[in-house]
Image: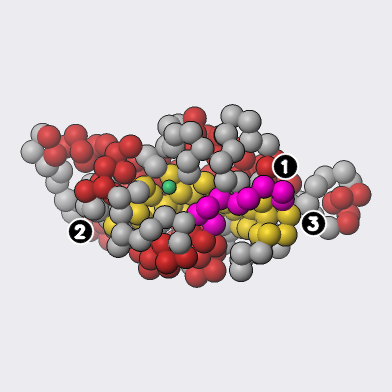
């Protein structure tokens, strides 16, 4: 996150605490909605703040009318520290990522059409495109079915996000992570586009595997990018 100072000095300067993180979450949530990755009030976005809190979108608020004041700030144990709205019902999914995965600065849960088809069929999305390996890390795995809104879903997602930046939630949708919320959104868009391409390629006889050398080289780029700290 950019260096918005927290606390009294920032307040005295007229800028609310966690302003930059809130703006990043709201902008990413609106783009997620505009890009069609969710319908209605579904999906949710969060960011790790510079001082180790988590800023999340609220439950059941339209993206068209959502404002900075609707966002909720929690500690990583799940206690609300600011906000009057209820946090997203998938808060445990987000908090588990920040607690258990290094260098995560943004998390997005979305319901993209083609990725959700793979999630419902419980089939992984193969790394069929070079760019996919660079940004996602490799084949997107499918989590064991776990009911939405539970802490167990967070644990299962974390288990599947050890080596990739996206995972499919069986019979549900997708979770993606990044150094920032914007990067987590980029991952979601790359995964959704690849899911659509693979779906089409299979109607033409099926996708080809990338050469092992290409995969290993691009996995190296991915590991470098994933090791960068939240920004
Ligand atoms: Zn969902």
Q: Earlier in the sequence, mark 3 or mark 1?
A: 3
Question: The residue tagged with tag 2: helix, strand or loop?
Answer: helix
Q: Is residue 56 visible?
A: no
Magenta run includes residue 87 = yes
Magenta run includes residue 203 = no
Specify few, some or many for label 1: CA neighbours under 10 Å numbering under 14, 14-19, or 20 or more.
few
Residue 211 at x, y = what percent?
Answer: 18, 54
Residue 160 at x, y = what percent?
Answer: 35, 64
Which callout, 2 or 3, points to the residue nearer the camera?
A: 3
Magenta span dominant secondary structure: loop
Q: Earlier in the sequence, mark 2 or mark 3?
A: 3
Q: Is residue 80 visible?
A: yes
Looking at the picture, tell me which residue is in the foreground, 67 or 211.
Answer: 67
Question: The residue tagged with tag 1: helix, strand or loop?
Answer: helix
Q: How many marks?
A: 3
Q: In the rendered structure, which segment of residues is drawn in magenta?
A: 83-91
Quadrant where the C terminus lies?
A: bottom right
Q: CA distance from mark 2 to mark 1?
A: 48 Å
Q: What residue is pinned by disc 1?
A: 69
Specify few, some or many for label 2: CA neighbours under 10 Å numbering under 14, 14-19, or 20 or more.
few
Q: Is residue 186 left or right of residue 196?
A: right
**CB under 8 Å between discs 2 and 1:** no
The answer to whether the beta carbon of the residue marked 1 is less than 8 Å from any atom of ligand 1 is no
Looking at the picture, tell me which residue is in the foreground, 72 or 12.
Answer: 72
Q: Earlier in the sequence, mark 2 or mark 1?
A: 1
Residue 75 at x, y = what percent?
Answer: 66, 64
Which callout, 2 or 1, points to the residue nearer the camera?
A: 1
Q: Is residue 26 left or right of residue 189?
A: right
Q: What residue is pinned by disc 2?
A: 212
> Residue at point 53% right, 52% down?
89
Q: What residue is pinned by disc 3?
A: 6
**CB under 8 Å between discs 3 and 1:** no
């Amino acid at each position: 996150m950019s260096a918005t100072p927290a606390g009294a000095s920032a307040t005295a300067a007229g800028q609310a605490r966690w302003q930059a993180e809130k703006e990043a979450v709201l902008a990413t949530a609106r783009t997620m909605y505009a890009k069609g990755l969710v319908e209605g009030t579904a999906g949710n976005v969060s960011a790790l703040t510079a001082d180790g809190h988590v800023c999340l979108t609220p439950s059941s608020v339209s993206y068209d009318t959502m404002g900075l004041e609707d966002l909720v700030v929690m500690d990583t144990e799940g206690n609300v520290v600011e906000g009057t709205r209820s946090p997203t019902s998938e808060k445990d999914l987000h908090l588990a990522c920040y607690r258990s995965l290094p260098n995560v600065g943004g998390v997005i849960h979305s319901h993209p059409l083609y990725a959700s088809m793979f999630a419902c069929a419980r089939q992984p999305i193969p790394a069929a495109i070079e760019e996919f390996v660079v940004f996602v890390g490799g084949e997107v795995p499918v989590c064991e079915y776990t009911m939405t809104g539970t802490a167990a879903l967070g644990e299962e997602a974390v288990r599947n996000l050890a080596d990739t930046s996206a995972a499919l939630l069986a019979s549900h949708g997708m979770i993606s992570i990044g150094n920032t919320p914007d990067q987590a959104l980029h991952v979601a868009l790359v995964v959704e586009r690849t899911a659509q391409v693979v779906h089409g390629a299979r109607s033409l006889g099926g996708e080809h595997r990338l050469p092992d050398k290409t995969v290993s080289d691009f996995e190296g780029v991915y590991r470098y990018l994933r090791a960068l700290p939240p920004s």
